[in-house]
Image (cartoon, rainbow, N blue to C red):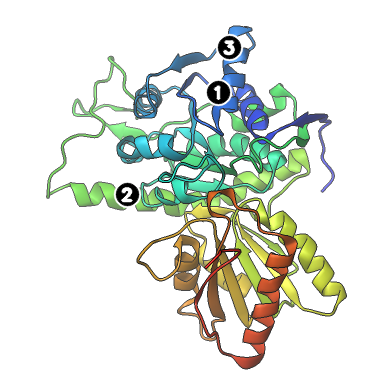
Amino acid sequence: MTPKIKQETTAMNGDEAVAFAVKQCDVDVVAAYPITPQTIIVEKFSEYVANGEVQTEFICTESEHSAMTACLAASATGARTFTASASAGLALMHEMLFVTSGSRTPVVMAVANRALSAPLNIHGDHSDSMAERDSGWLQIYVENAQEAYDSIIQAFKIAEEVGVSLPIIVGLDGFTISHTLERVDVLSEDVVKKFVGERQFPMVLTHEGKTVPFKLDPENPMTMGPNALQNYYFEFKRQQVEGMNNALKGIQEANSEYAKISGRSYGNGLIDPYKLDDAEIAIVCIGSTAGTLKVIVDQLREEGMKAGVLRLRTFRPLPVEELRNALKNVKAVAVMDKSMSPGGLGAPVFNEVRNALYDIKQHPIIVNYIFGLGGRDSSPRDLRRIFEDLTKIAKTGVAEKQVHYLGLRE
């Protein structure tokens, strides 16, 4: 698409692109604690605060648990709120992630995805955010620094939608995206502020019989996250599911509306298919790996192989119908995971995709490739081998193994 609005071409790494997007989104509060490979995000944003370039209240807390608690409290009072984390920091937030989503506070968090200890590893895989997949947060994963910038801007609009009112994680691969310098085209601050708009609030009925915005306000007292025992807790959780369902439409609308001003769209916002229309074999992945896979697909197409890629951009909520429609005519599918589920049958993305496709009449044969743990490189040769394996599976109709480990010394 041709952008309707003039943009400035810059050079930024993924972390800097995130910080710049937050700067443009008129954020009221940022509370954070540094952890590699996320540190550049809040470090850069603190410079904007110190230089007077933003009117944001920056809270440097003593831990990630405290950072999320501060974000929860700020968002509950009506503030537009942002934070960033990774790995052990995200794990330390675990308790407060559930409180934040359960309180329906639309905090936006960038996660520079990184492996979890032990053994200690600071490099990129998806173990951290996959461990939080049932915490009630929306999850979007980006392919490059440009998409990191664009997705943070969209994230505020998505999360703050009245029918959604849920926090959101934007995941960018640690070091691969967070620390790699790339071209990033940026919109003007005025355009971004207009796109994001003012934060909107659901209207609720208080104990005083008033209909007021859902936020903590001394003039209209209410309780958030109250004690809910057997007679009410279930209903609160069910409402979060409705918020997730509503986000499916909200994510697509944000992607489409953003495309009109920027010229950039990422599939339909939920999935980003590449040469899937006539594909007989396909790989499903999330994150930066998709870029390399697209190059390999181009090469395979020149050789006559009907191969394709499906990048799952939105992992929560899972776009079940979109997955089914995109993969219904494919004979064999490999799902790539940069995380593990020890003791389970395959890893998280594989389990979700396989489950989504189970009930279609002629579902493809689906195999799992676990790769890149702790930031291990996967060469184009390794990735090409997956397509070669899929070709054999498509011809024979048989997968000898369901779970494979790519580039592992056995």
Residue to which mark 3 is pinned: 49
Looking at the picture, tell me which residue is in the foreground, 162 or 125: 125
Identify the mark at residue 239; answer none if there is no mark. Answer: 2
Identify the mark at residue 275; answer none if there is no mark. Answer: none
Residue at x 63% of width, y 83% of height = 331
Q: N-terminal of the two: label 1 or label 3?
A: 1
Position of 132 compared to 210: left or right?
right
Q: CA distance from mark 1 to mark 3?
A: 10 Å
The kind of residue on which mark 3 rests is Val
Q: Is residue 380 above or below residue 107?
A: below
Q: CA distance from mark 3 to mark 2?
A: 37 Å
Residue 368 image point, x, y percent? 53, 70
Residue 75 image point, x, y percent? 40, 26
The kind of residue on which mark 1 rests is Val
Q: N-terminal of the two: label 1 or label 2?
A: 1
The kind of residue on which mark 2 rests is Gln
Disc 2 residue crowd, few under 14, some 14–19, many 20+, Cα 10 Å: some
Local SS, label 2: helix
Q: Residue furthest bottom?
A: 396
Q: CA distance from mark 1 to mark 2?
A: 32 Å
Mark closer to the observer (1, 3): 1
The answer to whether mark 1 and mark 3 are in CB contact below 8 A is no
Q: Is residue 11 above or below residue 229?
A: above
Q: N-terminal of the two: label 3 or label 2?
A: 3
Local SS, label 1: helix
Residue 380 image point, x, y percent? 74, 62
Residue to which mark 1 is pinned: 42
Q: Residue furthest left?
A: 230
- The answer to whether residue 276 of the structure is visible from this angle is no
